[in-house]
Image (tube, rainbow, N blue to C red):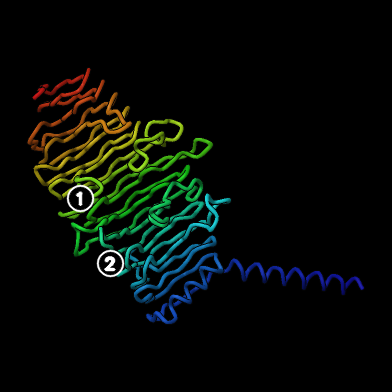
Amino acid sequence: MLKKISLSIFLIVGLLALEVHSVTAQQTIIGQDNPAVDVQAVQAAASRGGEVLLKGTFDFGEKGFVTINKDVKFAGEKDNQGVPITKIKGGFQTFFSPLPAQLPPQGPGPKIAIQNIHFDGTQAFPIYIAYCSGATIAGNKITNVRPFESPKMNFSVGIMVGTNWIQPAATRKYQPGAVTGMITIVDNDLDMANDTPAKTFGEGIFVHWATGITLQVSGNTIKNCSRNSIEAMDNYLGDDGSGSVVIRDNKVTTATVGLPFPSPFTPNGICVGWFLDGTGAGASNPKQNMKHTIAGNTVRARGETSMGMWIGSNEVIVKNNQIITEKQSATPIRLIGAQCRILKNKIEGIGSAAIVIAPSKSLTGSNNKCEDNDVSAFKASVAEVSLLTDSKNNTVMGSGGKAKDLGIDNQIKGLTRVTE
């Protein structure tokens, strides 16, 4: 009798182990280069969740996409140089994590990883994550994105994390808790060239309306965006004060022509801070404003009115970047925030001014420090540093050139102050 009980327990434990193994075992999906079967196969894997290895070439046709509602890790294969050899062709917002039906969300979203996949020829958004409690997007390659066409403008974003465009325009608003956790976007290679740059809101990496995220954007190569190459905008601290943005060691080259909306500055390199919520508490309330660090990036801004970096938040650190602008009306760094530190950047090329401090809306352009920036290889049409009306109590230290100062109580050292 004891032997029978022991045997039964052994069989039950064995069956449970088999069941757990079947749930947690990695799924392997081999692409058939056929939209009739590829989309369905990848969607089935996403619906099961867990780890999914994608091998070969997948064809998603014109409009195929995969909806992500569970914790899942998609990984492709890569060659000896780390270049993805798994490819997904076509599709529309190919990997998509939608908002839940009830808003604001009542619980955390899925944890998502997408790694080592070549997305080629997607329309609009190869990766669109509107609901997650953490995401890792690493080692992917994105090429030939087809803009989504609309009467006013076209849209294309390589990696989209946030809740803006997924909502109807009439009711669009920040959804607390939709995007949370650690968001890691590293070592991706994006070429966002398109045939209608003057009409296309073309972005490389766009993170918007997240809550308390720890955002790392590093080691990415981004080319030919016709709006902003890296944008982290209108992201709120969590209720516990959590949240930070680090943008580090990326290589950015903008398009030469860009969409002049929602501002005439275009196309741009790296933009952070507050825009849609720039007139409200988000921009000026330290309980909502997360810290941003922008360091070690190389940005080449090639447009006539390009900005290399736009800093629309307070207490941002911008250091050790190399920024090159190529046109007479371009601006390497445009700063509207307060208490920022612009330190040890190398600024080259031509433009109106290497650094512009210009208050806007509730951001005051005050109490900033600009020190040890190398502008020796920059040719300014106005002045090396330009402080516009109502900028206050800024400290600018240099080793030559001019500072056009139209503000109040700004401290200028090592540059010739001019007021006209």
Mark 1, other Cα within 10 Å: few <14 / some 14–19 / many ≥20: some
Question: Does residue 2 appear left or right of residue 68 in this picture?
Answer: right
Given the current orientation, which residue lies at the most extreme right position? Answer: 1
**Which residue appears at 20% of the width and 45% of the height?**
265
Query: Residue 290 appears in which quarter of the rendering?
Result: top left
**Which residue appears at 67% of the width and 70% of the height?**
19
Give residue 146's mark: 2
Q: Where residue 296 sits in the image (x, y, percent)? A: 28, 42
Q: Which residue is mark 1?
A: 260
Q: Is residue 57 visible?
A: no
Mark 2, other Cα within 10 Å: few <14 / some 14–19 / many ≥20: many
Foreground tag (2 vs 1): 1
Given the current orientation, which residue lies at the most extreme front position? Answer: 170
Quarter that holds the N terminus = bottom right
**Which residue appears at 71% of the width and 68% of the height?**
16
396 to 61, vertically: above or below: above
> Quick one: SS at disc 1?
loop
Q: Where residue 193 sits in the image (x, y, percent)? A: 22, 61
44 to 168, vertically: above or below: below
Give the amino acid type for the residue marked by disc 2 in the picture: Arg
Q: Where residue 89 sits in the image (x, y, percent)? A: 34, 73
Q: Earlier in the sequence, mark 2 or mark 1?
A: 2
> Quick one: SS at disc 2?
loop
Q: Where residue 183 sits in the image (x, y, percent)? A: 44, 50
> What is the C-alpha distance between the residues marked 2 and 1?
20 Å
Question: Does residue 65 appear left or right of residue 320 in this picture?
Answer: right
366 to 27, vertically: above or below: above
**Which residue appears at 11% of the width and 22% of the height?**
419
Give the amino acid type for the residue marked by disc 1 in the picture: Pro
Question: Does residue 73 appear left or right of residue 264 in this picture?
Answer: right
Q: How many marks?
A: 2
Quarter that holds the C terminus = top left
